[in-house]
Amino acid sequence: MNRLADLPRLLCGLCVALISPAYGGATDARAAEAGAQSAPPGYSTGLRGGSHDFEFLVGAWTTRQKRLKVSGEGSSDWQETPSNRHCALSFLDGVEIVDQSRFPDGSAAGLFLFGYNRVKQQWSLYWISPKTGQPDAGTVGGFTGKRGDFFGPDVDGKGRPIKVRVRWTVFDHDHVRWEQAFSYDNRTWKTNWVSDYTRGDPKALCHNS
């Protein structure tokens, strides 16, 4: 895939995904107030961050992943998945990031969209699956130091309501971690997916992105 030729399509998807949080100020405030009344530890849709929070992500990465076989059932049975490769590009002076993930065979695994709202001083994160082509419900938040927390409401694959926590941890220039946790009971978190990123060579990993 030619990166420049594909740029309009990526940006179009980015705009669709990010337009709602950019203009839903009053609605967001009411939702945040309601959610705070019953929420797991640390949950907040009001966390803020800086416009340079995700500069570290730009470039090429390989990932080592593990995830729970079953979520929301009290399972502690983990499985490792094949190492994906990620290619992240920066737009609009760093306030929009597009991170494309591919399976080891080169087929599309999905797309991360990161958008910074300068008014709210807050990042919105979305995942787009190639199966649907649509962004998920998304999470919002920002970084404090080397750790970023992002929260939001959603439903799981069985339609059960959940609260989601996405956590990014930057260990150094070449190593970061992404974690996803769900809360089903509004009291506790259960991590169900961990992905360790190692920086790679863009020429070797991103020639098709």
Image (cartoon, rainbow, N blue to C red):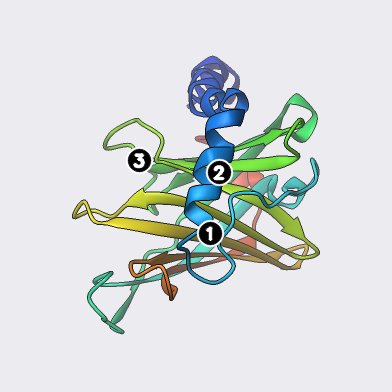
Of mark 1 and mark 2, the one earlier in the sequence is 2
Q: Position of residue 79 (x, y in %)?
A: 31, 76
Residue 142 place in picture, x, y as percent:
70, 52
Q: Quadrant of the rendered structure where residue 42 is?
A: bottom right
Left or right of 153, for residue 72? left
**Label annotation for residue 206:** none
Disc 2 marks which amino acid? Leu
Going by the image, does 25 lie left or right of 56?
A: left
User: Residue 98 versus residue 117: which sits nearer the camera?
Assistant: 117
SS class of the residue under badge 3? Answer: loop
Q: Residues within 10 Å of mark 3 (few under 14, many from 20)?
A: some
Residue on which disc 2 sits: 125
Residue at 31%, 84% in the rendered image: 76
Q: Are marks 1 and 2 in contact (CB under 8 Å)?
A: yes
In 3D space, how far apart are the residues under numbered discs 2 and 3 (Cα atoms)? 14 Å
- SS at circle 2: strand
Residue placed under numbered mark 1 in the picture: 166
Task: Inspect the image, locate mark 3, and give the three-letter code of the amino acid beneath it.
Answer: Ser
- The answer to which quarter of the image holds residue 181 is bottom left
Q: Measure the C-alpha gap from mark 1 to mark 3.
A: 17 Å
The spot of residue 91 in percent (x, y) is 70, 28
Q: Is residue 99 visible?
A: no
90 lies above or below 159: above
| Residue 137 in view, yes or no | yes
